[in-house]
Amino acid sequence: MTLIKSISGIRGTIGGKVGDNLTPLDAVKYASAYGTFLKQNSTKDKLKVVVGRDARISGPMIHNLVTNTLIGLGIDVIDLGLSTTPTVEIAVPLEQADGGIILTASHNPKQWNALKLLNDKGEFLSGADGAEILNIAEAAAFLFSEVDDLGQLTYRDDYMDLHIEEVLKLKLVDAEAVKKAGFKVVVDGVNSSGGIVIPNLLRRMGVEVIELYCDPTGHFPHNPEPLKEHLTDISRLVVQEKADLGIVVDPDVDRLAFISEDGEMFGEEYTLVACADYVLSQTPGNTVSNLSSSRALKDITNKYHGGYQAAAVGEVNVVELMKENNAVIGGEGNGGIIYPELHYGRDSLVGVALFMTYLSKQKMSVSQLRASYPQYYMSKNKIELTPTLDVDQILIAMADLHQQEEITTIDGVKIDFETEWVHLRKSNTEPIIRIYTEAPTQEEADALAEKTIAQIKKLANI
């Protein structure tokens, strides 16, 4: 069991010992630290925070602990209840709130939950702000309010609908064109909030929807990370129903994957590529993704004479570089679309709307669209960490081993070969080393991954 404190928030497994897991006391501790941080960095007499959660089983318990802790600090809470990460992100500025908390462990299995922390723009906190919150937590430097100064709780259950309205208002979203195309789509909502909001968005765009695992019980019917090996049910159903495509989201709806009409994966990496292709065709400009994302985005950006930059992994890093480069679209190769026209956060609703609009205008099948892009193949692997494994030394040794190649060290180690690359980094969300490779064929990507894993194991004597 694990408690991970990182740039991605406070994430851990439910139950167990305090300090080793995300127990009720830990939830209160870090909610207290976040609320205290906001109060220390504000001159306002009264602060306001937006809180929402995904459908995982522990959600109501953690939700009640966090909201009541903020109230105990004298902070007003706008409670969105069952929601999505991007919905909370857009709610923060719309409510003129001072911050936001999303209670979700994203793609992690049901044993996990987390506090994802936002600033007053509805964007993830910087590393420096996160470090300050951790210091406050460890010092237990909390001062709770007296009874007359407690915060007030306001419930809002309409924000997912408001989110849909904001998406449909976007200039590049054409619901009428999508309606005329007469699409039939299967949606896998992994029994979380995406099972509500994605079908509702599609129906507003005139799409016939077939729901699969769209009951928000929090009992995930398969591993919630939207990878090929977890999506056999929807792949089969897309073919069985003769649907035009399948749409899959993770529990908090910030990762998006498509299934082609033949039941094959469109490829998580190509979610961003396709959406960027459409956006750049209408509004040429720059793009940003992270070091673990496909080269295909750079190729598409070059096609439209834009500039491409790669950031360290982590949404906050991508957003920071997008702002520096005035990027018109960006995101992460795990299916995360960031479209600044609405907000600076990964948003599957935006991704769905842009993709469906582009598909309707291209007048081609999903498999044909996928075949039109540069063909790269990825292999995503991991090595479990042990207490004796010195990750930093291993990464240094791997860089030394390949010093004749192009090396990038802003986030772990990325080694660029002539036609392929490997990226090694310690995960922010799990106790693992992630090993991502990309090459012109799947066989080459897999072979590079196997070779890299063997090199790491030799260096680590495991």
Image: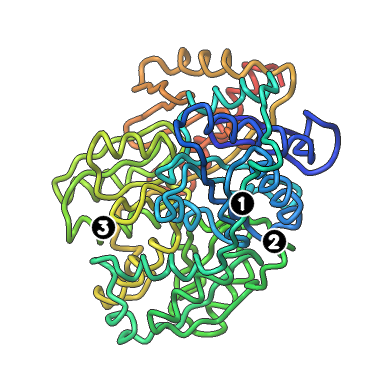
Q: Which residue appears farthest toward the right when viewing the image?
A: 16
Above or below residue 136? Residue 274 is: below
Which residue appears farthest toward the front when viewing the image? 148
Badge 2 is on which residue? 222
Q: Which residue is mark 3?
A: 277
Helix, strand or loop at disc 2?
A: loop
Identify the residue at horizontal 43%, vertical 27% (top origin).
414
Q: CA distance from mark 2 to mark 3?
A: 31 Å
Of the pair 99 and 331, the residue shown nearer to us: 99
* Residue in the picture at 31% in, 41% down: 288
Q: Residues within 10 Å of mark 3 (few under 14, many from 20)?
A: many
Relative image position of residue 363 (x, y in whole percent): 27, 78
Q: Amino acid at mark 3?
A: Asp
- Residue 282 position, x and y percent, is 17, 61
Disc on the earlier residue, 2 or 3: 2
Looking at the image, tell me whether mark 1 or mark 2 is earlier in sequence order: 1
Q: Residue at x 36, y 66 (%)?
A: 167
Closer to the observer: label 1 or label 2?
Answer: 1
